[in-house]
Amino acid sequence: PPNTTCTWPLTYPFRNWSDGLVPSPGTAALLRDGNRHAIALARREGRRATVFFSFPWEALPEEARPEVLRQAVGYLSWLGGSYFRADRGAAAPGATVTYTLHLVNDGPAPATTAVSTTFPAELGTAPTLAWTGVLPPGGALTFTLPVTLAEGLLPGTVVPHTARIALVEQGIVFSRTAWVRAGAPDLGPSALGCTPSPAEPGAAVTCTLHLENAGPADALPATAEVTGTLFWRASGSSGMPGTWTWSGPLPAGGAVALTRPFTPPVGMGYVVAFLADGVGGQWERAAWAEVRPWRAYLPVVMKSL
């Protein structure tokens, strides 16, 4: 989740032949290794969902396997498109934050669903949510929960708010957590994009990283590291992607736009920006740009014997 990191060591009882992954457009990186290579991907499209791990399950610590499996199965379930979000990633103590729980059943049959939320002590006033009901195929239901952050929270305090979601008949239980930090920067609204796409071979593709701090505190300094296959050098034998970095102050309510032109190779290029606010907040933003090869249509002449 944004603004949080969960680190597990991968222990290989055999030789490590695992690969880094490059997500296709619309695919999310769930897990990354120490070099920031994607090692687990997730994708939802229509009624289909996929989760792929590039490392063996046995490499995960034994205590982490049940939770990883529970969340993966929940994502693949009929309710896997459901989400629980806060309307901002950071707020001042005493401010009101609105949480949204959106349930959706993309399965072929009605789903008996049970949801509940656990409110941490850092939320000064918060309503209790507990609901059980039936969602028809394609049905959706949204709950809106306004809550108040407790007064006196130390700057940077992380407030996790978790919703438990159960698909009753199938015995599938998973959770969604919304994270808010008290008195901290929030680079959540930042965005990355590359144009034009598709582009012609040899044409310049311009990537723009829009950094925005919507939090109540300054980011001193904010940092950005942008890398990916879009930056692969056309010459040279290393084949390693290049890196574009930036560091500077980003005050509360401030924004900055960073633009770089590139001449990428033919194919679908992937670029990802790793953002940090200097006080523990981390985000990543991804974009893709396609360079299509030249196409020529030639006549075919045939002679019958």
Image (spheres, rainbow, N blue to C red):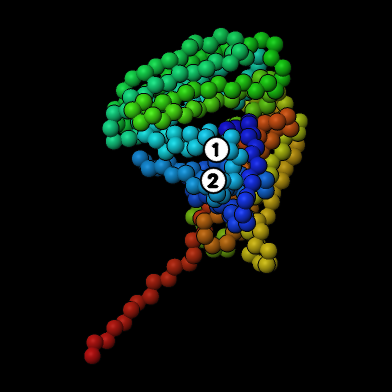
In percent of the image, x 39 and y 16: which residue is there? 131
Q: Nearer the viewer, residue 66 or 298?
A: 66
Amino acid marked by disc 2: Trp
Find disc 1 in the rendering and name its residue. Answer: 65
Tell me where residue 138 appears, x and y as whole percent. 31, 32
Where does label 2 land, which residue?
57
Is residue 263 depicted above or below 176 in this figure?
below
Mark 1 touches mark 2? (CB < 8 Å): yes
Q: Nearer the viewer, residue 14 or 165?
A: 14
Residue 116, horizontal then vertical, whole percent:
45, 18
Quarter holding residue 277:
top right
x then y, percent, for residue 141: 37, 23
Instruction: Give the mark count.
Output: 2
- Of callouts 1 and 2, which one flags the residue occurring earlier in the amino acid sequence? 2
Q: Is residue 226 visible?
A: no
Q: Residue at x 68, y 64 (%)?
A: 238
Q: Secondary structure at mark 2?
A: helix
Estimate the spatial distance between the alpha carbons at disc 1 and disc 2, rounded to whole Å. 8 Å
Residue 165 position, x and y percent, is: 44, 25
State the SS at label 1: helix
User: Residue placed at 56% from the left, 9% from the top?
Assistant: 125
Question: What's the residue at 29%, 28% (across, down)?
Answer: 110
Which of the 4 image quarters holds residue 183?
Answer: top right
Instruction: Tell me: residue 147, above or below residue 32.
Output: above
Which amino acid lies under the numbered mark 1 shown in the image of this protein? Arg
Does any portion of residue 125 appear in the rendered image?
yes
